[in-house]
Amino acid sequence: MKLIHKTTLYYVVISVPLVGLAAFISYFVIKAEIKNGTKEVLYTDNYNAKHMIRSFSHPQNITLSSDGYSKIKMVSKPLDKTIFIDTLIYDPIEEETVEFTFLKSNYWYKNQLYQIDIIKNNLDAEELLEGLWEGFGILLLFLGFGYLLLNWFISKTIWKPFYKTIYHLENYEINQHENFQLVKVSTNEFNNLNKSLNTMTNKIQEVFVQHKEFTENASHEMQTPLAVIKANLSLLMQTSNLTEVEMNSIQTIENSVKKLTALNRTLLLLTKIDNQQFSEQVLINFTELCDNVLKHYSELISLKEINVEKNFHDHLWFTMNPTLAEILISNLIQNAIRHNVKGGKIKLSSTINSFVIGNTGEPLSIPESDLFIRFRKGNTTSDSVGLGLSIVKSIVENNQCNIRYENLNSSHLFIIDFINND
């Protein structure tokens, strides 16, 4: 949920109960005020009725209202006390039962006892209270609409610099750092955020450049002594008076140098992938690419008597750097050959959005979760440097795709999901 929506939700959650409580309290306060007002009107009418009695030239009964409820009448028995009550009476004009308030009292004048009945229709008060509830209901509707309108306005105006900052961060490319510069804005909090992000990205860029230069320089500097060592080993091996033990020692050294050279080359490749230095992007037909890569390993496949089965669904296209795409497929095929058994199978298949390579082989000697970890390999005596699947993982992740491992019917399956494939 967006921050602005969450803030508005909190306002609504707080405001609605408060408005409801205010309406509840206001209802009883207004009702009490109306009741007090009704009492005052009844007592005033009672006072006027007494004044009217004092104006009588002779005792008499008189009706004070058109409905006949309010009246002055002569009685012989007095009331115990002044009566003030509410009652319901059917009103034929309104065609409904209406609440009335009665005031009954006695008054002696010239030895005659009178009973004064004053009644007031509370329909106006009830309509007023109903109007009050309707008013609060309308207020709640306008309050909700106002919050929605305020939410939209704030989102489009006040929060606009924040969303602009998010857009720049999402599209930030460390290789194109010069295009990233968050400008000063009027809101202090957003301006402080932009300043901090500018400082942070500048530091990241500096570290990136230093790391890139160090890796390239280290790799370059290592290549020269490795080449010298290899050349001198070749000269030593050509010496005629070497014993068998010395030849074996030189051979061991040469193998280690070859492994170190491969390791140096692989680590440099991983660094370049992680630093996104392969910027060229083209649309690649992975079905054709797979067929071409298989040709390079035809001798190894024949040597291990491996049967290759292909089940491609039309053509699988994806935009990627061509060098990385070839390395990706090559490493997967190499892995399928290296860890296969003699006379085993390699199964290649694809859909419009995925590529699958499976091979027969021995059960995994390491946990599935360690398959893509650098330098993690099941056979420690293997000539492999343990970075093939790590390179595959890096290539896939840097192209916003996904790779997963499954074991199905004693076959090891590596599945690439081209998530952003169109």
Image (cartoon, rainbow, N blue to C red):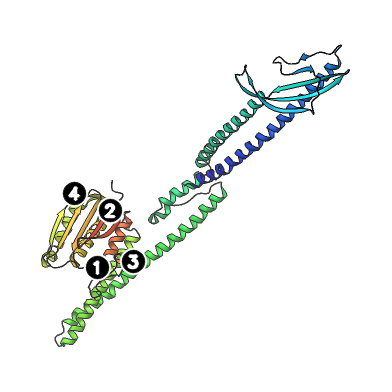
**Mark 4 against mark 1, which lies toward the viewer?**
1
Q: Quadrant of the C terminus?
A: top left
Q: Residue beneath label 2, please? A: 417
Query: Disc 3 residue type?
Result: Glu
Give the secondary structure at mark 4.
loop
Give the secondary structure at mark 2.
strand
Residue 313, which numbered label?
A: 4
Contact flag, marks 1 and 2 (Cβ < 8 Å)? no
Query: Disc 4 residue type?
Result: His
- Above or below, 179 against 212 in this view is above
- Residue at 31% x, 69% y is 220
Q: Residue beneath label 3, please? A: 216
Q: Is residue 108 left or right of residue 21?
A: right
Pointer 2 or 3: first along the chain: 3
- Above or below, 96 against 187 in this view is above
Pointer 2 or 4: first along the chain: 4
- Residue at 23% x, 75% y is 381
Q: Is residue 377 left or right of residue 167?
A: left
Give the secondary structure at mark 3.
helix
Give the secondary structure at mark 1.
loop
